[in-house]
Image: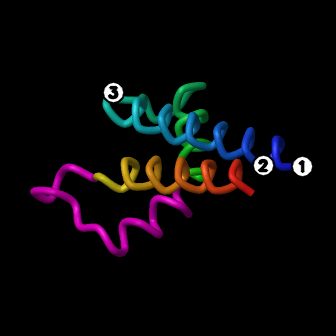
Amino acid sequence: MKALIISLLNLYVVIIFVYCIFSWFPIPRDGVLADVNSFLGKLCYPVLALFRKFIPSIGGAVDISPIVAFIVLQLLISLIRMI
């Protein structure tokens, strides 16, 4: 059970990473990439929105909430491994 939770959290970290990479490139409004980006956004939004409430963007343009999410998720994974 512990291994499954760790695997799911690692998968979520990868999903957030891919979502961040997608944000660097212009994505057409229709097509497969738009669908994938929309799906990833729906998966990532709840966690990133939680951190965005407490962490303002730098200069109004740089969002560091994914970095904080990575750190928190890695700490959570480490905590689960220790139990």
Residue 38: horizontal and vertical position, in percent? Answer: 56, 43
Which numbered tag is attached to residue 25? 3
Q: Nearer the viewer, mark 3 or mark 1?
A: 1
Q: Are marks 3 and 1 in contact (CB under 8 Å)?
A: no
| C-alpha separation, residue under disc 1 versus residue under disc 2 | 6 Å
**Outermost residue toward the right?**
1
Q: Which mark is residue 1?
A: 1
* Amino acid type assigned to the residue bearing label 1 in the image: Met
Residue 63 falls left or right of residue 65:
left
Does 65 sit above or below residue 9?
below
Q: Disc 3 versus disc 2: distance between alpha carbons?
A: 31 Å
Secondary structure of the residue carrying tag 1 is loop
**55, above or below 11, in the image:** below
44 relative to 40, above or below: below
Query: What is the secondary structure assignment of the residue under circle 3?
Result: loop
Q: Which residue is mark 2?
A: 5
Residue 10 place in picture, x, y as percent: 64, 39
Residue kind at label 3, given as amino acid type: Phe
**In the image, is residue 50 part of the stretch drawn in magenta?**
yes
Q: Residue at x 67, y 46 (%)?
A: 9
Could you tell me residue 36's position as x and y percent? Answer: 59, 33
Magenta residues (range):
45-63
Q: Is residue 74 magenta?
A: no
Residue 44 percent coordinates (x, y)? 55, 51
